[in-house]
Amino acid sequence: MNTKLIPRAVVWAAACFLYAPALQPDWSFAMLGDTRGEKSSTTNSVSTYLRTIAEKIATLNPELALVAGDWVNGNDTNTSSHVSFAQQYASWKWDMEPVFN
């Protein structure tokens, strides 16, 4: 086996890969995380900025939206009354509605 040809073969293969036509059409995605609010600024455990962010993502019309991290704060809100996880999740879904419709 001629070892001098290996580097040329690697460069040729890389060039073919880089300059080849796309095998799939372009697509887009949005990624956000930790959408929970801070204790001092939320009454429903969801970030006060989430609806605005969701509306902006919706204008970009991504094919995929990924949400990582904490969605809600759990029991950590600035109200003395307990907000159930179901209520927190309902608030989160309402804020994210522009992305999902």
Image (cartoon, rainbow, N blue to C red):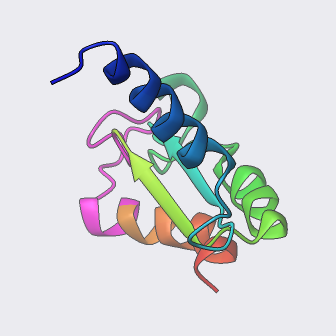
Q: Please, which residue is most extreme toward the bottom here?
A: 101
Q: Nearer the viewer, residue 52 or 25?
A: 25
The relative height of residue 62 versus residue 1 in the rendered view (above or below) is: below
Where residue 85 sits: x, y (%)?
A: 26, 59
Asked if the stretch drawn in magenta spans residue 87, the answer is yes
The relative height of residue 58 versus residue 48 in the rendered view (above or below) is: below
Q: Nearer the viewer, residue 25 or 93?
A: 25
Is 30 left or right of 1, judged from the image as shown?
Answer: right
At horizontal 66% and vertical 61% (from top left) the residue drawn is 28
Quarter of the image for the C terminus: give it. bottom right
Q: Nearer the viewer, residue 14 or 65?
A: 14
Tally the numbered discs: 0
Q: Please, which residue is most extreme toward the left here?
A: 1
The relative height of residue 2 versus residue 93 in the rendered view (above or below) is: above
- Magenta residues span 70-88
Residue 36 occupies quadrant: top left
Where residue 9 sits: x, y (%)?
A: 41, 31
At horizontal 43% and vertical 52% (from top left) the residue drawn is 67
Residue 69 occupies quadrant: top left
Helix, strand or loop: magenta stretch: loop
Quarter of the image for the N terminus: give it. top left
Residue 68 occupies quadrant: top left
Q: Please, which residue is most extreme toward the front here?
A: 2
Evaluate whether residue 37 shows in this view: no
At horizontal 56% and vertical 70% (from top left) the residue drawn is 23
Where residue 35 sits: x, y (%)?
A: 49, 43
